[in-house]
């Protein structure tokens, strides 16, 4: 009788652990399958930190739970075999193979999620670098343009002598040459 009670206790514990583990996997999968972000580097880095917290704090107890589940199942089957009892068959959906398949699916989703996070981080870092590079070039061009418009609108040529006019013409030609060089950078 005592052996039967212990076997019943192991069966109930297996069912409880299996239900709990499968429910945790079911709740975790949508988060791991989500590929939504706010498209900011800070947002993706926050998701990456959440993922690392999940791997450090939330998953290890579940790994232990899975190991305990497998140990309980094997212990129970051995005890039943030694007592000449029929093998224990968990309720549908809670077989060891079901749990193993769910766990493999979880690990596959984790790997895909981590790869997406790292790729998204690299993409956003590259975009941020390109934006900074563009801003630097734009700032350089803005600095170059300062004072150019006033120079072009100047009416100094109306009241100057021929040699001053020639100097203004040379200055204007230099400006046009400089502008042509800057034009390609502006278009890029």
Image (cartoon, helix red, strand yellow):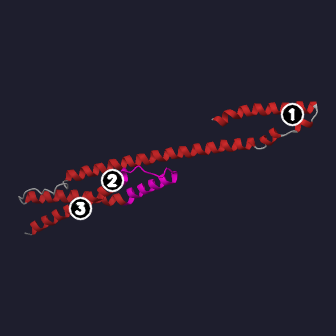
In the displayed structure, 164 sits above or below 81; it is above
Q: How many labels does the image show?
A: 3
Residue 149 shown left or right of residue 98 in the figure:
right
Along the horizontal axis of the image, is 50 left or right of 172?
Answer: left
Q: Residue at x 51, y 54 (%)?
A: 42
Residue placed at 16% from the left, 62% from the top?
11
Which residue is the site of mark 2? Answer: 29
Other residues around mark 3 within 10 Å, as few (<14) / some (14–19) / many (≥20):
some
* Nearer the observer, 94 or 151: 151
Q: Which of marks 2 and 3 is nearer the N terminus?
A: 3
Marks 1 and 3, Cα distance to the nearest angstrom?
89 Å
Name the front one of labels 1 and 3. Answer: 1
Residue at label 1? 168
Which residue in the structure is indicated by mark 3?
Answer: 17
Q: In which quarter of the image is the N terminus?
A: bottom left
Q: In the image, is residue 53 part of the stretch drawn in magenta?
A: yes
Residue 12 percent location from the top left of the image: 17, 64
- Locate residue 185 relative to residue 165 in the image: left or right: left
Q: Give the range drawn in magenta.
A: 29-57
Residue 145 badge? none
Q: Quadrant of residue 154?
A: top right
Is the magenta region chiefly helix, strand or loop?
Answer: helix
SS state under label 3: helix
Check disc 2 and report its element: helix, strand or loop.
helix
In this view, the mark in front (2 or 1): 1
Task: Name the N-terminal-most of marks 1 and 3.
Answer: 3
The one of 2 and 57 positioned closer to us in this rendering: 57
């Amino acid at each position: 009788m005592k052996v039967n009670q212990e076997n019943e206790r192991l069966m109930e514990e297996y069912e409880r652990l299996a239900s709990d583990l499968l429910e945790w996997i079911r709740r975790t999968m949508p988060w791991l399958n989500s590929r939504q972000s706010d498209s900011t580097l800070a947002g993706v880095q926050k998701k990456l930190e959440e993922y690392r917290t999940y791997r450090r704090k939330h998953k290890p107890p579940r790994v232990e739970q899975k190991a305990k589940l497998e140990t309980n199942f094997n212990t129970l089957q051995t005890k039943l075999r030694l007592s000449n009892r029929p093998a224990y068959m968990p309720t549908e959906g809670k077989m060891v193979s079901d749990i193993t398949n769910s766990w493999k699916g979880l690990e596959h989703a984790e790997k895909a999620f981590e790869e997406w996070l790292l790729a998204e981080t690299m993409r956003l870092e590259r975009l941020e670098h390109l934006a900074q590079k563009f801003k630097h070039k734009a700032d350089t061009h803005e600095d170059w343009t300062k004072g150019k418009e006033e120079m072009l609108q100047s009416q100094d040529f109306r009241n100057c002598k021929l040699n001053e006019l020639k100097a203004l013409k040379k200055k204007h030609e230099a400006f046009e040459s400089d502008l042509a060089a800057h034009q390609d950078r502006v278009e890029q």
